[in-house]
Amino acid sequence: MISKEIVQYIKQFIPERDKQIKEMERYAQEYDIPIMEVTGIEVMLHILKIAQPKRILEIGTAIGYSAIRMAKALPAAEIVTIERDKERYERALFYINQTGTSGQIRVIFGDALNVYSDVAKAAPFNVLFIDAAKGQYQRFFELYEPLLAENGLIITDNVLFKGLVATEEPIENKRMRQLAAKIRRYNEWLAGRNDYETIILPVGDGVAISRKRGERQ
């Protein structure tokens, strides 16, 4: 992982966020709600600005932080996002209304593994963003990948998992050890797919960018 000193150095070049976004960051920190790290989301938003997707599917809304950031960065984009936790779902709706992004963002309440038919109505998607239960990454990918447009992108957060995927030291916490192993297998599975090109960027908690190869390739 990048050293803390380098991360702090990079952060000084990140544009100032507005008050509503900072409030969401504060809320997430106070209530221990996982949202994308600042350096990671800035890189993702930069990539999305280049790609200019029309439709984005996000698995894992949480409080709506990344969906709102994407909506603000891409005013012409439509975002479908899925959240299974009732309290977080309601908080996301609150922030979406507060930030004036409800015209771009549709939040589906339910488990991403059970709402495929509802999501499919909005397909195809140009981008699939996976940021939910880490142990289910491959299942999310396999389930929703067919809804991706040709040459679409799949972005996965937390693929370095605090550096634990690469450590040679024993991980004492059983849950963390199991999750690290699952994410490591997911990364290897991604790299082995011939129908996608994948690169892992060591920003935030690790961001994987997988580009769907076109039929001509």
Image (spheres, grey):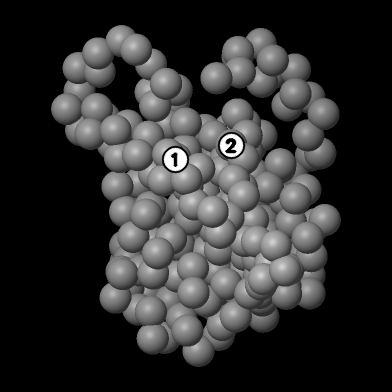
Indicate the quadrant where residue 51 lies: bottom right
Whole-percent x and y of residue 207?
57, 40
Whole-percent x and y of residue 101?
67, 71
- How far apart are the two marked residues, 1 and 2, measured between alpha carbons? 9 Å
Crowdedness near tag 2: few (<14), some (14–19) or many (≥20) residues, C-alpha within 10 Å = some
Residue at the spot x=44%, y=26% of the render?
162
Q: Nearer the viewer, residue 160 or 110?
A: 160
Q: Is residue 16 left or right of residue 109?
A: right
Quadrant (top left/top right/bottom left/bottom right) for the N terminus:
top right
Q: Earlier in the sequence, mark 1 or mark 2?
A: 1
Q: Is residue 1 above or below residue 5?
A: below
Residue at the spot x=47%, y=84% of the render?
120
Whole-percent x and y of residue 88?
39, 60
Q: Read off the residue under disc 2.
A: 200
Q: Read off the residue under disc 1.
A: 187
Crowdedness near tag 1: few (<14), some (14–19) or many (≥20) residues, C-alpha within 10 Å = many
